[in-house]
């Protein structure tokens, strides 16, 4: 799998660079060739990340925990049921108490942590930065926290989403969609309410908005910080292509944290949220002010192997 992914990634790089090689010399041609090369590298890295063991294509289940005992396994009588050959009828229980989770394994369950059999173990959630990951065959499972809710996320290294990955499609790379935007800093920072695809609400800090000109008018997008101290700002946006050429819930984009009055915004790096590729992700949705009537014909298109039935 790793070899095939790497081959695919570098093939994508080579194909994307090919048009640039035939460009006429000159400032405009050189700028386009440079942008094509940069975006080709970015796309190859994205494919490699998506198809890795920890990529979004491996997600195979998401279960929200209730207070107390939550049994887990293949049998329909469990609180959390996942029909996978790697699991016993009941492998154990996730015990939620006082916002802490402990896993208690059944004897002979085959569940391990760092290669060692598990009996009972306290589970650190993903919000800790180092979640406790348990294994059963090709499955990996760990605790996530979203908007104060604790759940169990399952990855399957043999997930058909991964093994049958169909590649990504894009709009043509264009320097017209690389804009030097004005950064309007919020003093003090705003706090933006964000809803995720499951209807959970969270609040994110917005240090400012990017303002840019396109098609004869100005547009603005609020940025947010995912974590304090991040060196990039995160943008969630929807536009006139959403639900048509691109994923209906919108797309994501990162920009460098501005150090001055302006900041480069490269819409060629707009990409699909994880929910476009897998129904077990918990994607945040663009806030109302980031829903543009502009058609952003740059970046990633709708994933051919995805489904929007869960929107």
Image (cartoon, rainbow, N blue to C red):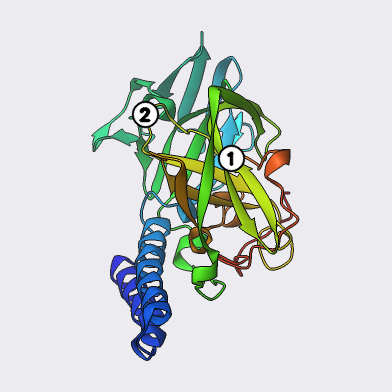
**Residue receiving disc 1:** 282
Up the image or down, 128 lies above or below 215; here it is: above
For the residue labelled by badge 1, is the local secondary structure a helix, a strand or a loop?
Answer: loop
Q: Toward the viewer: 250 or 214?
A: 214
Q: Residue at x 31, y 35 (%)?
A: 112
Residue 268 seen in the figure: yes
Label 1 crowd (10 A; few <14 / some 14-19 / many >=20) = some
State which quarter of the image contains the N terminus: bottom left
Q: Image check: 68 left or right of 201?
A: left
How many numbered discs sit on the rendered protein?
2
Q: Earlier in the sequence, mark 2 or mark 1?
A: 2
Q: Toward the viewer: 257 or 306?
A: 257
Instruction: Tell me residue 281's x, y (percent).
Output: 56, 44
Instruction: Tell me residue 299's x, y (percent).
Output: 54, 65
Instruction: Tell me residue 53's x, y (percent).
Output: 36, 52
**Residue receiving disc 2:** 229
Residue 87 seen in the figure: no
Q: Residue at x 36, y 67 (%)?
A: 38
| Residue with the most extreme top position | 98
Q: Quadrant of residue 169?
A: bottom right
Q: Residue at x 57, y 67 (%)?
A: 298
Label 2 crowd (10 A; few <14 / some 14-19 / many >=20) = few
- Measured in 3D between alpha carbons, the distance from the residue under mark 2 to the one under mark 1, in whole angstroms, is 23 Å
Up the image or down, 147 lies above or below 87; here it is: above
Q: Image check: 108 left or right of 202?
A: left
For the residue labelled by badge 2, is the local secondary structure a helix, a strand or a loop?
Answer: loop
């Amino acid at each position: 799998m790793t070899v095939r992914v790497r081959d695919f990634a570098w093939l994508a790089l080579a194909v994307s660079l090919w048009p640039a090689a035939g460009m006429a010399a000159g400032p405009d041609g050189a700028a386009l060739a440079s942008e094509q090369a940069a975006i080709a590298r970015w796309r190859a890295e994205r494919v490699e990340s998506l198809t890795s063991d920890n990529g979004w294509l491996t997600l195979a289940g998401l279960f929200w925990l209730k207070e107390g005992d939550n049994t887990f396994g293949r049998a329909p009588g469990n609180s959390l049921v996942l029909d996978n050959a790697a699991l016993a009828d009941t492998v154990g229980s996730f015990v939620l108490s006082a916002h802490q989770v402990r896993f208690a394994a059944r004897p002979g369950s085959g569940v391990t942590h760092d290669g060692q059999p598990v009996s009972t173990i306290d589970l650190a959630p993903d919000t800790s930065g180092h979640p406790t990951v348990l294994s059963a065959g090709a499955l990996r499972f760990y605790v996530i926290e979203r908007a104060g809710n604790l759940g169990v996320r399952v990855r399957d290294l043999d997930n058909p989403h991964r093994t049958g990955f169909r590649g990504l499609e894009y709009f043509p790379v264009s320097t017209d969609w690389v804009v030097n935007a004005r950064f309007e800093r919020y003093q003090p920072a705003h706090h933006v309410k964000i809803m995720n695809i499951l209807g959970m609400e969270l609040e994110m800090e917005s240090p400012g908005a990017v303002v840019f000109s396109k098609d004869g008018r100005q547009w603005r997008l609020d940025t947010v910080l995912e974590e304090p101290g991040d060196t990039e700002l995160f943008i969630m946006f929807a536009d006139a292509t959403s639900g048509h050429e691109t994923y209906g819930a919108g797309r994501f984009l990162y920009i460098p944290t501005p150090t001055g009055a302006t900041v480069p915004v490269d819409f060629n790096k707009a990409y699909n949220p994880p929910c476009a590729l897998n129904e077990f992700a918990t994607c945040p949705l663009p806030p109302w002010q980031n829903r543009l009537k502009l058609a952003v014909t740059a970046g990633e298109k709708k994933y051919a192997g995805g489904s929007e039935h869960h929107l």
